[in-house]
Amino acid sequence: MFQDQGQGVFQGLQRDFVLNQPARNLWAGIREDAIDYFRRHRISWWGGAVDEPTGHLLSSQVACVNHLYPLRQREDLVLALLAGLDSTIVAAERVDDGYIAFEFIGDRQYLKERGFSRGAHCTSVDAAMIGRTVTGDRRIFLIEWKYVEAYVVKNQYVPARAQVYDALILAPDSPFRPLDPRCFYYEPFYQLMRQTLLGALIARHEDHGCTSYRHVHVAPDENGEFHTSVTSKTLRGDTVYDAWRSSLKNDELFLTRSPRTLFEPLTGLPDTGSHTAYLAARYWAGR
């Protein structure tokens, strides 16, 4: 599949699961175009060099790009995917120079974080799409992608972070139920909190003309360690998703899929066979 024997360098050491030619971590059908897109939009690759992805075979960013980038110029496929997430969507709208944007941060720094660059130093989502609803409104879908991540109990609370996020968490129009903000400072809830605030503020400020949002979390069903990583003792639930929904005023804004179920609405659509065969062989366990 990769035509690369591994032993590439990651964090200063040669490793079996890291490609020597990092570009081969991307599906051949998108390789050059995706690298050019990241370069043109000044997007950082996680763990990679300035202008190429990491060779780490378990990168969730690379997994997201391999799944979604081939759809970026296909309005029909993006509409099918969006309608599978939300039955009120009747059209896909452009974002960036296609129908999917990667490492999306919005037009402005709504969270008042110090950095504002795509893929580094501020809150971002792995991908974003915009759909038009039956009522003509524009709705943004913020997509976070997980692959093999798992989390341990580690308190991320520091006063500098509290100064940025706590007032937004506690505000009357916050998307969260009344809770002590400290409950959110444990991964993966720390990231979920920041992305939820980003979505709410994007809708409030009508960023990209959007007046509503959906937060979409994609993770393989097989990664049981992630799904049971309820690291915050204040949030109640048997799974990460149950615990997260318990914190939200409106849990219908939070959508979850596995990579395979996300792609089910694309089954049988034109010119998808080679792409989905690659995804099934590489990412979809047992398929």
Image (tube, rainbow, N blue to C red):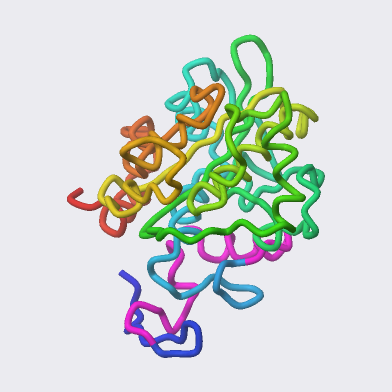
In the image, 132: left or right of 57?
A: right
Quarter of the rendering containing residue 151: bottom left
Q: Which of 287 and 113 is in front in this view?
A: 113
Would residue 19 be counted in the magenta stretch?
yes
Up-down relation of residue 27 to residue 195 (above or below): below
Residue 280 location, x and y as percent? 28, 51
Residue 189 location, x and y as percent? 51, 47
Up-down relation of residue 1 to residue 229 (above or below): below
Task: Tell me the residue at 51%/73% (across/down).
Answer: 54
Q: Nearer the viewer, residue 175 or 181?
A: 181
Task: Tell me the residue at 32%/56% (across/down).
Answer: 278
Q: Nearer the viewer, residue 71 or 153?
A: 153
Q: Which of 110 and 4 is in front in this view?
A: 110
Residue 44 location, x and y as percent? 65, 65
Task: Tell me the residue at 60%/17% (across/down).
Answer: 133
Q: Residue furthest top?
A: 135
Q: Which residue lies furthest to the left in this view?
A: 286
Up-down relation of residue 159 to residue 24 (above or below): above
Q: How many badges with numbers are in the image?
A: 0
Would residue 140 be counted in the magenta stretch?
no
In the image, 193: left or right of 27?
A: right
Q: Which range of residues does the magenta coloring cover?
A: 15-44
Task: Tell me the residue at 60%/28% (across/down).
Answer: 178
Residue 109 location, x and y as percent? 80, 47
Quarter of the rendering containing residue 201: top right
- Name the quadrant of the N terminus: bottom left
In the image, 107: left or right of 39?
A: right
